[in-house]
Image (tube, helix red, strand yellow):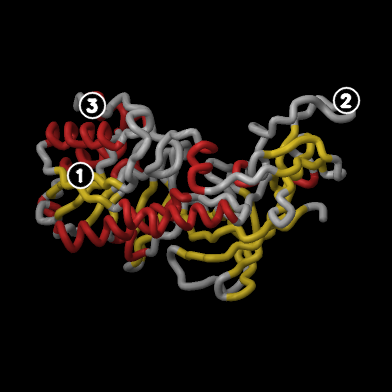
Amino acid sequence: MSDNSQKKVIVGMSGGVDSSVSAYLLQQQGYKVEGLFMKNWEEDDGEEYCTAAADLADAQAVCDKLGIELHTVNFAAEYWDNVFEHFLEEYKAGRTPNPDILCNKEIKFKAFLEFAAEDLGADYIATGHYVRREDVDGKSRLLRGLDSNKDQSYFLYTLGHEQIAQSLFPVGELEKPEVRRIAEELDLITAKKKDSTGICFIGERKFREFLGRYLPAQPGKIVTVDGETIGQHQGLMYHTLGQRKGLGIGGTKDGSEEPWYTVDKDVENNILVVAQGHEHPRLMSVGLIAQQLHWVDRETLTEPLKCTVKTRYRQTDLPCTITPLDADRIEVRFDEPVAAVTPGQSAVFYLGEVCLGGGVIEQRLPLTV
């Protein structure tokens, strides 16, 4: 315990149960613990979606209970410039971005890390992410969280070993029910608080309505893979590959009872292409091209590698082979065809428990052309 007593840790307090228990666990390990609440969005929605004030109150209540100081900082300008504008540009281009990954890269493990070290004198930061850190040969590696159902390594693949070395992930060694049990035993206000969902820091707004404020919707045709027009979409940005909900085209074709799925987006002509069945050949891919690569434990990939990949969060690991194309692009070939590989999302690679890194999906390699 004395080893840690001179080390100062700033915990990113979100007002949720995971960061609350993280702060407690670090206290138990002997660290000097303080909290930091980040405000990353300027609310303009009134009470319905504005959870920041309530989250801050919960974070303050937890810090008071644990006897630790809570700092606050406003990163709304950084979030807008480095996360949200990119998010809008990607939707405008017909892709489906993952802002949580960019938020971790630009805000939690950059702006927060720098502020904690430079302004608050931190030796480490800590977050409530369900991941683990392992130090091998002087480098820090990123491992999946112990709770496979909650593992968040997919969202942290952009971290380098230097950032990981300055970060602690106390709940990564626990399963979620154990985290809740600890919070209940401590009688923390966050013990039964539900996990947040929705876009990082924007919360659980009605997505279509929210996006429509920033990007003008352009209605267009919904066309089957056979070229038949069967409806109208309200904007390509509202649809992602593999999506079933929100197409607004009830009924069946040729007597088939199978539902319709988005299988392609023709951005140039503003056409949404649909087909019936979640395993329709047009929805399947044999591989993908990824760009904007980031490797956690290496500078670059120089030769083919067999590993597993996730092309979206919570997906089962897919066996694959990666082949470098150039310094910032790779080709990924799946062992078996995969449905709904979506440009703009991230492909994240693993060897066993270790997160190797990943990249943004530039294009999918379709099963049928």
Tell me how far mark 3 sits from mark 2, CA to CA: 54 Å
- Say if 181 sits above or below 120 in the image: above
Q: Position of residue 11 (x, y in %)?
A: 23, 47
Nearest-to-viewer mark from 2 and 1: 2
First along the sequence among labels 2 and 1: 1
Question: Callout 2: helix, strand or loop?
Answer: loop
Q: Position of residue 26 (x, y in %)?
A: 20, 44
Label 1 sits on residue: 26
The three-letter code of the residue at mark 3 reads: Ile
Label 3 sits on residue: 189
- State the image quarter where residue 229 is shown: top right
Disc assigned to residue 255: 2
Residue 349 in sight: no
Q: Position of residue 339 (x, y in %)?
A: 69, 45
The three-letter code of the residue at mark 1 reads: Leu
First along the sequence among labels 3 and 1: 1
Q: Position of residue 306 (x, y in %)?
A: 62, 61
Tell me how far mark 3 sits from mark 1, CA to CA: 18 Å
